[in-house]
Image: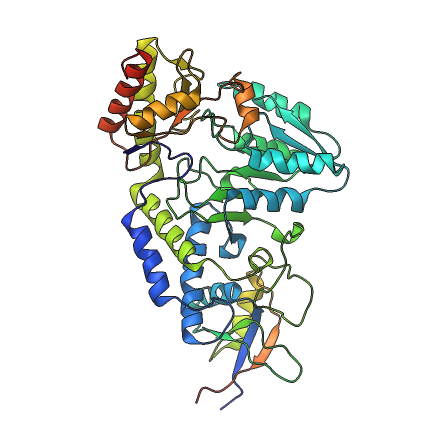
Amino acid sequence: MGQQVVIDVGSVTYAMKSRELLRNNGIRAYVERLPRTPNTSGCGYGVYVPNGVEEAEQILQEAGIHVLGRRERVQQK
Amino acid sequence: MIYLDNAATTYPKPPQVSAAMQRALRMYGANPGRAGHRMSLRTAEAVFQVRERAARFFGAPGPENVAFVMNCTQALNMVIKGAVKQGGHVVTSCLEHNAVMRPLETLRRRNVITYTEVQVVPGDNDATMDAFRKAMQEDTCLCVCTHVSNVWGIRLPVERIAALCHAYQVPICVDCAQSAGILPISMAENGIDYLCAPGHKGLYGPMGTGLLLALNGASLDTLIEGGTGTASESLVQPEEMPERFESGTANVPGILGLGAGIAFVQRMGIQNLYEKESRLACGVYDRFKRSGKVELYTPRPEPPYFAPLLSFNLPDMDSEETAAKLDRHGFAVRAGLHCAPRAHAFYGTLDRGAVRMCPSAFTGRAQTEAFADAVLQIAGGRH
């Protein structure tokens, strides 16, 4: 199983807008709080996209949503 | 009591509004946009849905263009003080509320700006447009004007003013205090850069709610900075809307109540409400006109040139005295200057003010007829 990533879009508003946009394009997406890493702040939100991250990121960028990067997802136990 | 002070704040509110606020306190008690736990995300989801609804309602590009604020005055201050440049010039109308005039005058006294008040010509939009065109200067950096006068109900041709502003590359801010939820308006179709609206008037939300809709929020300097739940490592206020203008914990019960209020207006149909309330205001106007006992200032307040409100006076009686007598008859109206001295100066009522009545979705014909009866009784000395 590949690495699970969250697309960082900054705020919860943009995360929810991104989720709606991706779902309208047939891509499953879930709003999640961004995980903190040694190099990044934990403040902010993103969308977890189980499949099709590349396509999802392209859709978001084409819609004018500022993608700030990708974060490794914290596995839910 | 028959409440006709709906131009100040609507009462009663639809039951859905109080239900939404109670639900917020019961179910959405966590801080939205701050944490990752389920209640915080659920609360953020509920707030987001109101943002989406408000964006659709006002024709904004997306939910991110909608910032929740305390009231229309706060939104106007945020735009006026955030948009002007040192040495710049602002165009406004002669019918503005102090929510516009006081920020402008404060900036003028600090030698930050100059401003021009454009003379509106009721019933002649071409003449009004000529006056706006003449007011434009090379250093004009903002046009801010009301959509509807809160005293006289006069509707300004904001879509034409917006087109003029864009020809001069000047952003336009519209004060929709008296029109939001009453007259249809669309940022996209009407070319509005900043739209400021109260939540508690024609949108039927609770007091303490308001909206700032901005096409390009990053272009505004901020009045308030603080925590946004995003990019917390940075000491610089984020540029992205809506967080740029929403530092601190949101008024979630108010926002969800506002969402229910907007949904109520959508369900009733804004055009239906406008026509119904206009018929009521015009009915009162006609009774007053026929009696010859009431001082009227404006033409008949009918669509599309007026919003459904009516200000008047009784001969030889101060407006506050008339309102006090009406209160004793069981009618709630507002007298005085309505925080809009420039609008009162326009019709020469600065010294005595005027009595303002304004119906809402919950006002019926029997109530406005009883109101007209009471006013005419007072005018006839039988009170």
- Determine whether, in the image, residue B27 is placed left or right of residue B108: left
- Seen at 52% across and 22% down, the residue is B344
The spot of residue B326 in percent (x, y) is 33, 24
- Determine whether, in the image, residue B156 is placed left or right of residue B380: right
Which residue is nearer to you in this view: B214 or B97?
Answer: B97
Q: Residue furthest top?
A: B292
The spot of residue B188 in percent (x, y) is 51, 43
Please say if B249 is above or below A37.
Answer: above
Which residue is nearer to you in this view: B217 or B334?
Answer: B334
Please say if A11 is above or below B291.
Answer: below
Q: Hey, which quadrant is residue B81 in on the image? A: top right
The spot of residue B64 in percent (x, y) is 52, 57
- Seen at 69% across and 29% down, the residue is B136
Please say if A72 is above or below B99.
Answer: below
The spot of residue B224 in percent (x, y) is 62, 55
Q: Hey, which quadrant is residue A38 in on the image? A: bottom right
Question: In which quadrant of the rendered image does the C terminus of chain B lie?
Answer: top left
Asked if one can make out residue B162 in the rendered structure from this viewpoint, the answer is no
Please say if A67 is above or below B321.
Answer: below
Question: In which quadrant of the rendered image does the N terminus of chain B lie?
Answer: top left
- Seen at 52% across and 53% down, the residue is B67
- Determine whether, in the image, residue B363 is placed left or right of residue B235: left
- Seen at 45% across and 65% down, the residue is B44
Asked if one can make out residue B2 in the rendered structure from this viewpoint, the answer is yes
